[in-house]
Image: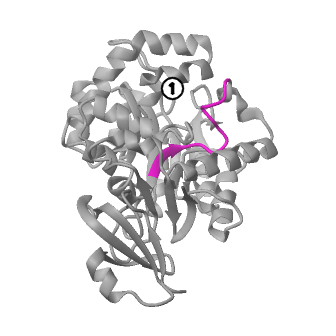
């Protein structure tokens, strides 16, 4: 295959997302071969090279959607009740969401629980090229307590049930193990937060995952369940809508990653898609939860990434909420690129624009370090050197 030369007014280059002007990304066989000044490129270019001139656009790494579900679509009213639908119906929902995510600039998605192992199947179909969508990192069957929360989770009781499903998931080739610790809805300050999995059950899943060098991900809004996750060595904490200042300090002193899905509580546009009681509870406790989340983005010590929890094509909103809460633009952008790749353990192959990495590249109208809202409209999407969108 001949070289592809991707030219743009500016780009966010390397692990620090350094803005460089008038750049050229030289690509061969889906891999970034070199990053040049456009003047250097003009001296090197050869007949037959494919030149893609993006003019005044800014290029950057393709985004990671760090909390996705394939068979859930938060854009649809009543989506939380769709887990009992058939495998065929789940697959149709997944195909639609995958394509929309890719067109929005998401080139890698982390799917945190689906039924029927459709995530494992679709991950392989995307690799084959028979399905259009982001590269997938998958968790197979999410594990919840028999009496606990988790719309996409499957009920479990006792250490051996958790161990058995962990091993079945790993036999199927998952990339991460997912457990559901607490309820999903936020609570008011000082209210009790139930937890549905014991320390021994959590530790069993963590140990099983670590035996194969995999990470464990925990749905957890806060409460004592959060302390148990930290005690047991959970690798990634999802949500944390009700984290306390004392727990923030514990997280700061640990190696744990936090994956924020702030839009679930901060975005009023999601309210019509859930039961009225759920929406009313969110409105009631929204501002308290906002103060909890602000502690994370303003910490400066907590490693965090961003996801939507199945709000397909709406990842840009998570960056807006992060900045609104006091986070920096560069940390928000890193939360869906460089740091997301590190959290997922794939930083050696993707997540930034560097020589030797996959050519997962998107382009936007402005520099997102100046205005993260520019990610709402992504006119150019390339994955593995293949162009999927070019307006």
Is residue 193 depicted above or below 205 in this figure?
A: above
Is residue 65 located in the magenta-colored stretch of the structure? yes
Estimate how packed mark 1 is, as few (under 14), some (14 to 19) or many (20 or more) residues with alpha carbons within 10 Å: some
- Where disc 1 sits, the SS reads loop
Q: Can residue 234 be seen here?
A: no
Is residue 125 depicted above or below 276 in this figure?
A: below
Residue at 27% over, 47% down: 369
Is residue 387 depicted above or below 156 in this figure?
A: below
Could you tell me which quadrant the N terminus lies in?
bottom right
Q: Position of residue 155 (x, y in %)?
A: 64, 35
Region of the chain picked out in magenta, as a range:
64-77
Residue at 33% over, 40% down: 230
State the residue in front, 132 or 168: 132
Q: Can residue 353 be seen here?
A: yes
Could you tell me which quadrant the C terminus lies in?
bottom right
Residue at 23% over, 31% down: 326
Q: Position of residue 208 (x, y in %)?
A: 49, 55
In the image, is 353 to the left or to the right of 272? left
Q: Position of residue 200 (x, y in %)?
A: 45, 40
Residue where numbered disc 1 is placed:
184
Residue at 60% over, 18% down: 272
Q: Position of residue 158 (x, y in %)?
A: 57, 38
């Amino acid at each position: 295959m001949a070289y592809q030369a991707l030219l743009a007014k500016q780009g966010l280059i390397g692990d620090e997302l350094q803005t460089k002007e008038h750049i050229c990304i030289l690509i061969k066989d889906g891999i970034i071969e070199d990053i040049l000044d456009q003047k250097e490129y003009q001296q090197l270019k050869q007949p037959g090279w494919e030149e893609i001139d993006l003019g005044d656009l800014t290029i950057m790494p393709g985004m990671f959607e760090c909390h996705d579900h394939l068979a859930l679509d938060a854009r649809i009213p009543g989506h939380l009740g769709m887990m009992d639908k058939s495998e065929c119906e789940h697959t149709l929902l997944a195909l639609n969401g995958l394509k929309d995510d890719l067109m929005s600039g998401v080139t890698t998605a982390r799917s945190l629980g689906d039924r029927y192992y459709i995530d494992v199947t679709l991950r392989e179909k995307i690799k084959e090229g028979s399905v259009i969508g982001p590269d997938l990192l998958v968790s197979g069957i999410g594990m919840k307590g028999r009496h606990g929360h988790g719309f996409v989770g499957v009920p479990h009781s006792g250490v051996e049930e958790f161990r058995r499903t962990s091993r079945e998931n790993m036999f199927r080739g998952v990339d991460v193990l997912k457990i559901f610790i607490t309820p999903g809805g936020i609570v008011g300050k000082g209210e009790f937060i139930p937890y549905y999995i014991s320390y021994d059950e959590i530790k069993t899943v963590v140990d099983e995952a670590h035996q194969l060098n995999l990470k464990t991900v925990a749905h957890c809004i806060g409460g004592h369940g959060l302390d148990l996750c930290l005690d047991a060595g959970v690798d990634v904490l999802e949500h944390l809508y009700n984290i306390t200042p004392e727990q923030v300090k514990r997280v700061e002193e640990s190696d744990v990653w936090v994956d924020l899905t702030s839009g679930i509580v901060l975005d009023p546009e999601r309210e019509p898609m859930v039961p009225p009681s759920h929406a009313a509870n969110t409105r009631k406790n929204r501002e308290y939860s906002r103060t909890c989340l602000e502690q994370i983005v303003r910490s400066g010590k907590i490693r965090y990434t961003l996801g939507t929890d199945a709000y397909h094509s709406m990842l840009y909103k998570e960056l807006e909420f992060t900045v609104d809460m006091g986070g920096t633009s560069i940390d928000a952008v890193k939360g869906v690129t460089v740091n997301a790749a590190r959290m997922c353990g794939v930083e050696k192959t993707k997540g930034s624009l560097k020589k030797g990495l996959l050519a997962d590249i998107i382009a936007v109208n402005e520099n997102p370090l100046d205005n993260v809202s520019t990610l709402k409209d992504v006119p150019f999407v390339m994955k593995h050197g293949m162009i999927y969108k070019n307006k």
